[in-house]
């Protein structure tokens, strides 16, 4: 990780600029407070999801399935706003793969359509279907999978054979189990898994409904446990909070690293531009549920939250305090204004994308080759994210920080490599 230079007067004491003046220590405290609230809200809504999943498993019905899906979507809202904490905070980055790894080879978990194919040279477990197979073979060794437990998922199946797309846990594994595959290509429509996939005995569809219920229950239990761990890391005395508040200089680096890396390489590049270049709905972040537009909006909102030092919780209450915006304004008011404008422009583009989806223009359709309107909607958001990253780079210079290396993406930095 890059380290700050040591401009003591600018960074270790109050920046002299009237009422806007804040210290780095105060700013990173707000940053930690927002993380504590965001992960706490993610945990609370994951517990709501767990309750809805328990009800679906115990009493399968169309209404129970829709309630579980709605709970999953609600749970994603605060979580996506925390993704800005991933980059720059090793504690978060080392953990994040447990809850939000993507993309995944869903055939590892459950049945898939014939068009999905089978094992590949890249992943011979791509169609393992552990739900249908109580005895499996991994790395040449027989594995007893007769009981699907959180331990089996976490310790044996997740990233089996060291392959990253063998995602067996987290939000997207649960998403697949609630929606099933989206087989609509670049037409509108999400996955259409029937509630009868969870009916026990007569009426079960897809086979192995008891094991599917066990898998969904275990995966949701793991998600709750993982979020509980991260929420605790940001509470008073938690390791993640201590890492940024004990050294405010490192805290500022973490903040700007997260803002720049999520804005540029991760979101503008890997999550948005790449899918558009490939015209591939499989590159959607929430591809089973067609919730990608909300994930994109909340990722961008998380970046804005960190800069402004303000987070609106699901219940409408607000967590706010001394902000990076205050710190920048004390150094260069025009630069702060530019950053706020860039963030607002990006959010406007994200809101326009969401409005289009809510109006019936699915994100899948926007990715279709030759769909100029869809490309323009997505690229407006991509361009906004790139522009705000350039302003974040200017902030690094204005605060006299060492250069910070943000995450990149071939789709932005070396487009020809995408097709090689």
Image (cartoon, grey):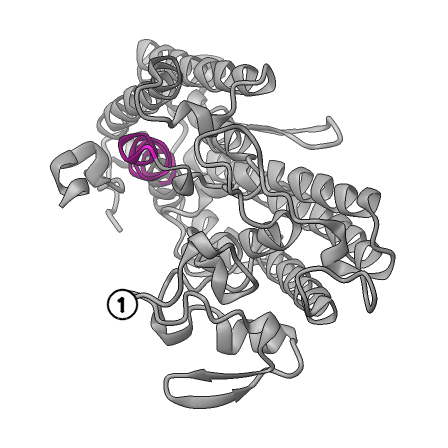
Main SS, magenta region, reads helix
Q: Of 247 and 269, which appears nearest the observer?
A: 269
| Residue carrying label 1 | 121
> From this viewpoint, is residue 188 visible?
yes
> From this viewpoint, is residue 236 visible?
no
Q: Is residue 343 above or below residue 120?
A: above
Q: Give coordinates of residue 168: x percent, y percent.
A: 52, 64
Snapshot quadrant of residue 147: bottom right
Snapshot quadrant of residue 303: top left
Q: Is residue 265 above or below residue 108?
A: above
Q: Give coordinates of residue 395: x percent, y percent.
A: 28, 25
Q: Is residue 37 left or right of residue 348?
A: right
Secondary structure of residue under mark 1:
loop
Identity of the residue drawn at 36% across and 37% down: 280
Identity of the residue drawn at 67% across and 59% down: 224
Which residues are the magenta region? 258-279
Q: Give coordinates of residue 28: x percent, y percent.
A: 47, 39
Q: Give coordinates of residue 352: x percent, y percent.
A: 49, 13
């Amino acid at each position: 990780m890059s380290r700050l230079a040591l401009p003591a007067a600018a960074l270790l004491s109050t920046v002299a600029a009237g009422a806007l003046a804040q210290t780095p220590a105060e700013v990173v405290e707000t940053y930690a407070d927002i993380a504590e609230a965001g992960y706490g809200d993610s945990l609370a809504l994951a517990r709501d999801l767990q309750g809805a999943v328990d009800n679906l498993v115990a009493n399968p019905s169309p209404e129970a399935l829709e309630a579980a899906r709605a709970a999953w979507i609600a749970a994603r809202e605060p979580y996506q706003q925390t993704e800005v904490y991933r980059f720059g905070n090793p504690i978060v980055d080392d953990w994040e793969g447990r809850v939000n790894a993507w993309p995944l080879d869903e055939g590892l978990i459950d049945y898939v359509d014939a068009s999905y194919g089978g094992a590949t040279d890249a992943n011979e477990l791509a169609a393992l279907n552990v739900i249908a197979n109580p005895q499996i073979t991994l790395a040449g060794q027989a594995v007893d999978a007769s009981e699907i437990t959180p331990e089996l998922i976490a310790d044996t199946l997740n990233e089996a054979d060291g392959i990253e797309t063998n995602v067996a846990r987290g939000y997207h594994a649960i998403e697949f189990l609630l929606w099933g595959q989206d087989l609509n290509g670049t037409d509108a429509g999400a996955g259409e898994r029937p509630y009868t996939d969870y009916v026990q005995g007569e009426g079960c569809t897809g086979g192995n409904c008891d094991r599917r219920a066990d898998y969904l229950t275990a995966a949701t239990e793991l998600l709750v446990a993982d979020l509980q761990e991260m929420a605790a890391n940001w509470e008073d005395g938690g390791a993640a909070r201590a890492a940024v508040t004990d050294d405010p200089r490192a805290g500022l680096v973490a903040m700007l690293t997260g803002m720049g890396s999520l804005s540029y390489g991760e979101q503008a590049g890997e999550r948005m531009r790449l899918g558009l270049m490939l015209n591939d709905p499989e590159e959607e972040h929430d591809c089973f549920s067609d919730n990608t537009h909300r994930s994109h909006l909340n990722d961008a909102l998380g970046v804005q939250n960190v800069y402004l030092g303000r987070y609106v919780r699901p219940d409408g209450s607000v967590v706010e305090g001394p902000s990076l915006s205050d710190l920048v304004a004390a150094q260069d008011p025009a630069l702060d204004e530019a950053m706020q404008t860039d963030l607002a422009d990006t959010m406007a583009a994200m809101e326009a994308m969401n409005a289009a989806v809510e109006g019936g223009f699915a994100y899948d359709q926007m990715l279709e080759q030759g769909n100029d309107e869809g490309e323009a909607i997505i690229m407006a958001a991509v361009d906004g994210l790139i522009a705000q990253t350039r302003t974040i780079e200017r902030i690094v210079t204005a605060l006299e920080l060492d250069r910070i290396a943000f995450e990149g993406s071939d789709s932005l930095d070396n487009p020809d490599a995408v097709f090689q």
